[in-house]
Amino acid sequence: MKKGQITELTIEDMSAEGAGIGRAVTEENPGEGLVVFVQGTVPGDKVTAELTKVKKRYAIGRLVDVLEESPDRRSEDEICPYLSRCGGCSMGALRYGRQAALKEQQVKSKLEHLGKVDFEKETVFNPIITSEEVGYRNKASMAVSTGGYITEKGGIRRPVHEPRIGFRVRKSHEVVDCGFCRIQKDTVMAAAEALRRFMEEDGICSFDRRWGKGLMEAMTVRTAEGTGEVMVILHIHGKGIPGAPKLIRYLDEYIYEAGGSLESVAIRRLDGSHGEEIQIIAGAPVIIDEIPHPADPERVLTFEISPDSFYQVNSRQMINLYDKVRGYAFHDGCDNPVILDLYCGIGTIGLYLADRAEAVLGIEVVPDGVRDANRNAVINRVVNARYVCAKAEEFIPQALEGTSGEDKELEELVGRADVAILDPPRAGAGRELLEAISRAGIDRIIYVSCDPATLARDIAYLREEGYILKEVTPVDMFCETGHVECCSLLARSSR
């Protein structure tokens, strides 16, 4: 096949980036055919596409015409008006039931092909835990653009165009000015409107990377689902925001009208001379969220969240995920275990399990996260959880050797650990940490992953170390997008 060629395709699958996947049968690929990725298509569509890039194993196509629409394609009035340009909701044109089915199959396929898992023999694969809801994200990072600025006679600067606050066009620096988003909370859109008004009235310009000049680059909004508290973080190039009190007043008014309560405003200085320094310019240094206590419906667990702390972006599905972790942690009557909570963030998972554990030891490399985790233990009156700032792959071997620098009680907990919970970033846990866990002789591993490919890679290594993958449960934390969370239980083969 050649660049520029028109081909007819039936779309069979969808990539995480939202491109439909079809196969073109050619003389060079007479069997299954050449894989072709086509943006703007969904599984079940029959289309014609022009090939814009042709490689040995795949091709990229531009949609020319939809010959037959998929029964799983949403109608025009159901689709977000920004979908064709915004790079956010890669599965937004697909009905939710098919989204969930695709994610479930993608998790299973990656574990089978990359992790060499046999679901017929040793592993239970549970149906995906779904949640079709709007406004589920409790954190939004929005880009800001005025196209830079123009310097007029007399040295007066003015923006190139009106402020645009939203999300970037796919594979572009262009910002889509969003007045609505299906997956963001109303407080996010309110904060964006307040910033828009302030920038227009005061002539505030966005940062222009071409010239290294300008002020505003982005805005992050965090909303605590359980309390309605809101934190706004403004990413700027410079020492501060001229007229900041006016902006804070607008943010407070607009967020209140949207049903939230502005409790914290911070600026993150991106100027090279300052590093990435965060300064609270109004309100508290944290916001507070609450979730139901897993063992007592009359109680809640309370969490302080600081600007850089990791917190699951879907608060409602977070509870379903943590319930699954809890079930795995106390599986087969395993009660009162010593739990290692690795990549623990602000301590949410460990504190959710602490009432049935002998002890929880959390390890996190981000100092703010460790501070929040220890503070959250105190707030919730949990006396059997402690958190240390360290790289887990270094701390665990040192603790086993008695050279960690921590007290002997903590080092002893590592040697007695029954359960290790891993919730790493998208890049996965890495071999060093997995070797350390295996060396510690930990019987049970609960691996929470937001990337099925790195999960499969790490599970393949753990299986070589004598662990059996007992059970897998996908959790759709990110509906409308191509991402999916996954909770897995592994146990030593001797169990």
Image (cartoon, rainbow, N blue to C red):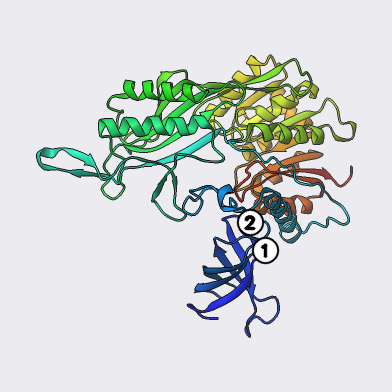
The amino acid type, in three-letter code, at marker 2 is Arg
Residue lying at 56% horizontally and 22% vertically, measured from the top left: 228
Q: Position of residue 205 (x, y in %)?
A: 28, 38
Residue found farthest to the bottom: 27
Residue drawn at (37%, 20%), measured in percent from left and top? 249
Q: Are marks 2 and 1 in contact (CB under 8 Å)?
A: yes
In the rendered view, tell whether residue 242 sits above or below residue 170: above
Under tag 2, what secondary structure?
loop
Mark 1 belongs to which amino acid?
Gly
In the figure, residue 207 lies in which quadrant? top left
**Res 169 label:** none
Residue for point 48% across, 48% down: 82
| Residue 155 visible in this rendered orientation of the protein | yes
Residue 299 percent across, percent down from the top left:
72, 16
The span from disc 2 to disc 1 (Cα, nearest Å) is: 8 Å
Residue labelled with disc 2: 73
Q: Is residue 388 left or right of residue 466?
A: left
- Please rate how many residues cluster around mark 2, counting C-alpha atoms within 10 Å: few if below 14, some from 14 to 19, many from 20: many
Image quarter where the C terminus lies is top right
